[in-house]
Amino acid sequence: SSQICLIAHVTARKMPTLHRHEEEKFFVNAEGRKEPVPSIHDPPTRELSVVVPSYNEEDRLPLMMDEALNYLEKRQKRDPSFTYEVIVVDDGSKDQTTKVAMKYCKKYGSDKVRVLSLVKNRGKGGAVRMGVFSSRGEKILMADADGATKFEDIEKVEEGLKNLQPWPNQMAISCGSRAHLEKDSIAKRSYFRTLLMYGFHFLVWFLCVKEIRDTQCGFKLLTREAALRTFSTLHIERWAFDVELLYIAQHLRIPIAEVAVNWTEIEGSKLVPFWSWLQMGRDLLFIRLRYMTGAWQLETRKCN
């Protein structure tokens, strides 16, 4: 056990730097002028922030943005007290993702749509974190750029969040879930991928997160306080970040709901390559080891 402890400590990566590059401290408004980004440490001024991590998504982003903004605008017409913002985080893309997202900023105004361009690729978890730390919402929704989840299903995850009340210390998380679709998806997958999926599920369950059947669905709604506490502690910025996020949440005794959502396999879906599965397995193993041995602490840090 002392050897395990030593391995966990020696291999424990320091927490990723929360430092923003100079250019990341601003977003470009609809008029093309730079404005400083807000901070999650400020009081919320919007009801909902939608954070969309995007890496080379010039083709798929428009469909998702059209659907999301169509829904959000209709909802605001129905209920004028409802306020929102959409933050597209371009995670160091090599294509025109920022340019595509800026069209929506110009159309809807930069109070409603903001584009945060990261200087270099951080990974999906790192991109979501930067968006979360720049958001103004009482509630923060993570949503994938491919639009695989029907956006109106936000009402289901909101309901899930509401049902967790009273929220301890204003903290709660509601996760969209595709667990109910598993039988169908297995029928369409190769045996190898199905085997990998079961292996991953088992690792998640065995190592870290017991109650949640689908940790990887990119549709998650967090209260502002829950987002601040979990993302401030997060170490992993790539594939397995969702698992660590929920592991942290469970340790902080944050209540978590899992809610079935509609989900469609989208053309051009980024399949997780085999080596990424191995990397994910390694990350999951280390999440458990490093927290168990104290190599990683559940500490909250401020982004500067």
Image (cartoon, rainbow, N blue to C red):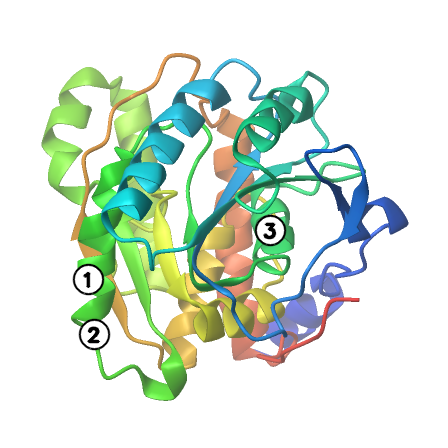
> Quick one: label 3, few (<14), some, or many (20+) residues within 10 Å?
many
Q: Secondary structure at mark 3?
A: helix
Q: Which mark is residue 164?
A: 2
**Mark 1 element type:** helix
Q: Residues within 10 Å of mark 2 (few under 14, many from 20)?
A: some
Earlier residue among tags 2 and 3: 3
Quarter of the rendering occupied by the C terminus: bottom right
Name the kind of residue labelled 1 in the image: Gly
Any part of residue 211 in sight: no
Any part of residue 182 in sight: yes
Q: Name the residue type under label 3.
A: Gly
Instruction: Please name whichever residue, 63 or 171, is drawn nearer the observer in this view of the structure.
Output: 63
* Label at residue 160: 1
Q: Are marks 1 and 2 in contact (CB under 8 Å)?
A: yes
Give the residue drawn at x 39%, y 87%.
169
| Rendering coords of residue 103 (x, y %) | 60, 22
Query: In the rendered structure, which disc, 3 or 1, sits on the residue that comes first in sequence?
Result: 3
| Residue under numbered circle 3 | 131
